[in-house]
Image: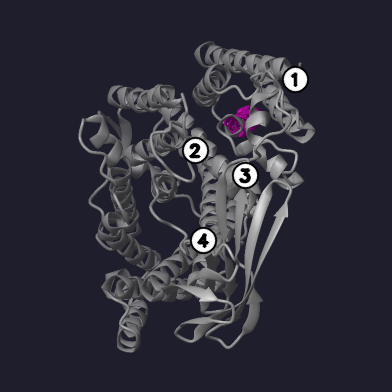
Amino acid sequence: MLAEAGTGILAAGMLGATLSALLWLRTALFGGSSRPARLATTATLAAAVAGVALLEWALLRHDFSVRFVAENGGRDVPLYYTVTGLWAGLEGSLLLWLLIHCGYTWWLARRADRYPPRLHAYAMVVVGAVGVFFFALTYFAANPFGAVFPVPPDGPGPNPLLQQHPAMGLHPPLLYAGYIGLVVPFGFAVAALLTGRTAHDWLRIVRPWTLFAWVALTAGIGLGAWWSYTVLGWGGYWVWDPVENASLLPWLTATAFLHTSLRRPAAHATWNVLLACASFVLVLLGTFLTRSGAVTSVHAFTDSPLGPMLLGAVLLAVVGPTVLFGWRGTARPVRGPTAPLSTATAVLANAVVLLTITAMVLIGTVFPLLSDALGGPRTAVGPAYYHRTAVPLAVVLLLVMGVAPVLRAAGGAAGRLRRLAVPAGAALATVAVTGTLSRPGLPALAAFAAAAFVLTGLAGELVRRLRRRPRPAGVGGLLAHAGIALVALGVAGSAAYSGSVERELRVGETVRLGATSVQLVEIRRASDAGVMEVDARLRLVTAAGRERSVDPVLRYYPARDTAVTVPEVVSDPLRDSYVTLIAVAADSGSATVRLAVNPLVGLLWAGGLLTTVGGVVAMAGAARRRRGVRPTPGPRPAAAPAPVERTPA
């Protein structure tokens, strides 16, 4: 009964999404009231809410007659992970995707009276068409409400890796909110091409939507790295896995879009359209990689029939805007040459570097698939490739970030160069001191210098702005840039200075790594409902002199025939002590233990948090400005609009 009801809800949602897209198309072509289209959009959201609620109810009731529950539920699964089990499987994660997409669509429909009617209606057609596709995908190829007969008495529960950390309750929803939010700028970019309004109107509309999606995606990526660090047991947080890269790619292009759409947006009309479209195309590509079974990853769903349909969606999202772009072209202002030392030059350089990094990461991500498709060996692209390509470009990006705030200052080229003197001095001092004391290697040294350059320049700029009671949006941007610099410091420091040792210990024996040591005290075994557990009690003495007991764990889940290693991490201000239980002897007399010391990892988490906070502050400031509340006294003079000429693409 419940399975039939769920399938009916999906059918109703697909019908509602189709009707909504058609009604918005009628509004775009012929005008008139958008009320019927908005009602259809609301009905589609109601269907998505009902579908998610019904599947959660089935999980909580342990209704194993529903296929998704039989494959991902379990009577012994804790309540929290039963709820989050909705997105632990392919079909349930698509249902969550639909819910978030319908939420965005409904909220965008509610704001019809605030946007140019025809532009808004065409954008709703595009966003609605995406919803139709994902409803059809879920209904025909990934229906979570399929019936099971005979009904099993129990299920295996979610993937054990997804039951080890509470961040799994936030990481996928935040990622999805970031991914799906980029459909709004994509929809308006296509609408701008259809209506010929590519210069400015649509950018004013989509910047808040893009910023919200960017903040959610930033937080989701950060939580994913934290989950990887604290659960997987290998001591790292980023391994250039294809699915990790799939989340990074749209983040890079969305970051570039936020910059080009802010400074002289009409001057970057072509860039803005291309970046808005590319961001969502990369979202679809990431969805294909994650849900097609094309790549093997701890983050990916395998054995999926969705690959051809998702690949078709990627191709359509590329071909459609490309044809429109060739037909319409973009509006470009008539202007003279741009000064080399100007904000416009820095914005353009920022976009070029970000797109180059995107290209390097994209090539490394899809190369194994292309090689396999062309009949060659499926050659894996390892971290060394990204370290040689993306990492040097990231250092260049940091330097551009450090220079850009100075270029907004008055005083001409000479004055701007003088303002760069202090950040440049800080960078040189960092190179001299760090290189003399520790010799971390050229890549890390360059990253340290670039981060010092950025942070020193941002600190000076922040002080100058605070004296003038700045807009919150500007302060948010500075905080986000400072967060990126801290992330760079954390990544470079942990890569340059981390060390590890692995050894088999008998009870009472000790292993040392520098000034850090662990001593095996005892080994304990336990068996609970659905899981067998072995933990090692160890006495840890950190380099800072702290002494405490740690208990890394090995867990075995018979229903999934899966073993999970859960490390214990002890954080000091300058370093983490990371202890992992690798194996235990059958007689419990000895254990293989891995001890790692990871310096400066805390800067990575602090930087990710600061970047997210900066984005939230910028969102709050932008919302306040849109409501007509000025954070600074006095009117701001409006710039005269640039004359516009129409040029073909």
Quadrant in which residue 585 is drawn: bottom right
Q: CA distance from mark 3 to mark 1?
A: 29 Å
Point out the frontmost of discs 1 and 2: 1
Whether tag 4 and tag 2 are in contact, CB under 8 A, the answer is: no
Mark 1 neighbour class, 10 Å CA radius: few under 14, some 14 to 19, many 20 or more: some
Above or below, comparing residue 620 to residue 138 in the picture: below
Q: CA distance from mark 4 to mark 1?
A: 40 Å
Q: In the rendered structure, does residue 109 fall within the stretch colored magenta?
A: yes
Q: CA distance from mark 2 to mark 3?
A: 40 Å
Q: CA distance from mark 1 to mark 2?
A: 34 Å
Residue at the image position 54 percent from the left and 69 percent from the top: 591
At label 4, the amino acid type is Gly
The first of marks 3 and 1 along the sequence is: 1
Q: CA distance from mark 3 to mark 4?
A: 20 Å
Which portion, as a residue range, is magenta? 94-112
The first of marks 1 and 2 along the sequence is: 1
Which of the pair 378/347 is nearer the observer?
Answer: 378
Point out the frontmost of discs 3 and 4: 3
For residue 649, say whether it is visible: no
- Identify the disc placed on residue 558: 3
Which of the pair 90/211 is nearer the observer?
Answer: 90
Above or below, comparing residue 115 to residue 410 in the picture: above
Which of the pair 134/323 is nearer the observer?
Answer: 134
Q: Which residue is mark 4?
A: 233
Q: Which residue is mark 1?
A: 2
The first of marks 4 and 2 along the sequence is: 2
- Identify the disc placed on residue 182: 2
- Residue 208: x percent and y percent? 55, 44
Mark 2 neighbour class, 10 Å CA radius: few under 14, some 14 to 19, many 20 or more: many
For residue 75, say whether it is visible: yes
- Residue 98: x percent and y percent? 60, 29
Residue at the image position 37 percent from the left and 40 percent from the top: 275
